[in-house]
């Protein structure tokens, strides 16, 4: 019987990721302020090959550090604006699409994303930079949800630890 290299690769005992996780939770200093939000549960999932870390903001071309940004509806459209008013929505959307494409290519159905982020949050700040939360998701979290990918907030990791590990 003859197998292609791809077929052999697909059947080897190589772990395939089940989750996309926020890169900052893997310990990478990629947040807007140049810090990380390391999470031991996420690190274990990555070490086991069950999760793959990505940062939508970096994938969208934004630098680290960068000016703080929040989501805000402007003329009925969800925008991402920096504290000084610069519209960075395009970069956030590019990064979100890159994460979605990765999820589709690797048949990943779940994402564990950092809470309150304008990219990754299930809930985000309201664009006033006052610490007020909204009920709408960040750009990447919302796009993943629209495509049937379950988004788990980093806030819920402790409650879900037994199910994840």
Image: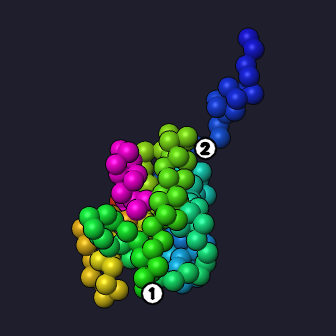
The location of residue 143, given as percent across then percent down, is 39, 53
Mark 2 or mark 1: which is in front? 1
Mark 2 secondary-structure assignment: loop
Residue at x 69% of width, y 32% of height: 9
Taking the magenta stretch, the answer to whether it contains residue 157 is yes
Mark 1 secondary-structure assignment: loop
Residue under label 2:
15
Q: CA distance from mark 2 to mark 1?
A: 44 Å
What's the coloring here?
Answer: rainbow
Packing grade of label 1 (10 A; few <14, some 14-19, many >=20) is few
Packing grade of label 2 (10 A; few <14, some 14-19, many >=20) is few
| Dot placed on the residue nearer the N-terminal end, 2 or 1 | 2
**Residue range corresponding to the magenta coloring:** 139-158
Q: Is 134 displayed left or right of 24 in the figure?
A: left
Q: Quadrant of residue 79?
A: bottom left
Q: Is 119 displayed left or right of 74 in the figure?
A: right
Residue under label 1:
84
Who is closer to the viewer here, 112 or 12?
112
Q: Is residue 41 depicted above or below 101 in this figure? A: below
The location of residue 3, given as percent across then percent down, is 73, 19
Who is closer to the viewer here, 40 or 119?
119
Q: Is 131 displayed left or right of 91 in the figure?
A: left
Taking the magenta stretch, the answer to whether it contains residue 155 is yes
């Amino acid at each position: 019987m003859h197998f292609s290299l791809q077929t052999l690769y697909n059947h080897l005992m190589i772990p395939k990721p089940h989750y996309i996780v926020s890169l900052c939770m893997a310990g990478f200093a990629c947040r807007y302020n140049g810090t990380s939000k390391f999470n031991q549960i996420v690190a274990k999932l990555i070490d086991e090959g069950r999760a793959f870390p990505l940062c939508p903001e970096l994938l969208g071309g934004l630098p680290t550090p960068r000016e703080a940004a929040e989501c805000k509806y402007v003329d009925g459209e969800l925008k991402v604006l920096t504290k000084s008013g610069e519209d960075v929505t395009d970069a956030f959307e590019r990064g979100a699409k890159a994460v979605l494409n990765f999820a589709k290519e690797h048949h990943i159905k779940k994402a564990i994303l950092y809470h309150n982020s304008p990219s990754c949050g299930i809930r985000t700040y309201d664009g006033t930079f006052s610490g007020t939360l909204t009920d709408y998701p960040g750009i990447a979290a919302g796009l993943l949800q629209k495509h049937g990918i379950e988004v788990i907030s980093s806030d819920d990791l402790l409650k879900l630890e037994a199910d994840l590990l």
